[in-house]
Amino acid sequence: MPHPLPGLDDPEQAAFAWARYRMILRWMTLAMIVIVTGAILLLDFAYGPLSWVAIAAAVGGFGGTIMLTAALMGLVFMSSGTGHDERVKDIE
């Protein structure tokens, strides 16, 4: 018996879900740029001039954490929003 929510099997719904996922990542990239810039300025204020290694570490640490979190949470939202989670628990 087919499930009422087609999930990512429906090309139109899949295109909408992936577009929403990309939009989430774009907004989070903008937020990450603002947060990393603020963090570098705060570190510069607190510790004085930073070397390029410290700046690269801050960008990698703060930026990498934010973007990895955004990517994984975006996939969770996409999975839940398309009904994929419900389809998996109904398989027998």
Image (cartoon, rainbow, N blue to C red):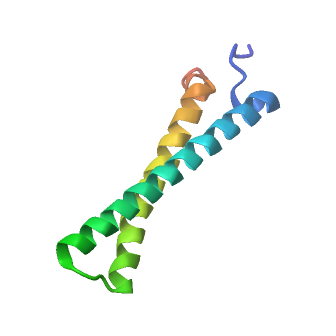
Question: Measured along the vertical axis of the image, is residue 86 above or below residue 51?
Answer: above
Residue 32 in the image: state x and y as whole percent.
45, 55
Residue 76 spot, x, y in % from top left: 51, 37
Q: Is residue 88 visible?
A: no
Q: Quadrant of the N terminus?
A: top right
* Res 81 quadrant in image: top right
Seen at 68% across and 18% down, the residue is 5
Q: Is residue 59 above or below residue 87?
A: below
Residue 41 is situated, as x and y percent measured from the top left of the image, at: 31, 67
How many badges with numbers are in the image? Answer: 0
Compared across the picture, whether 66 is left or right of 86 comes to left
| Residue at the image position 39 percent from the left and 62 percent from the top | 36
Q: Is 12 on the left-hand or right-hand side of 69?
A: right
Inspect this view and state whether residue 20 appears: yes
Residue 2, x across and y down, in percent: 74, 16
Instruction: Judge left or right: residue 2 versus residue 76.
Output: right
- Residue 3 sits above or below residue 24 on the image: above
Given the current orientation, which residue lies at the most extreme left position? 46
Q: In the image shown, does 3 or 59 lie closer to the viewer?
A: 59
Which of these two is toward me, 34 or 19? 34
Query: Which residue does the image show at 43% across and 56% down from the upper left?
Result: 34
Considering depth in this image, is 43 or 20 the residue closer to the camera? 43
Seen in the picture, residue 63 relative to 25 is either above or below; the reply is below
Query: In the image shown, does 17 or 59 lie closer to the viewer?
Result: 59
Quadrant where the C terminus sits is top right
Q: Residue at x 31, y 63 (%)?
A: 39
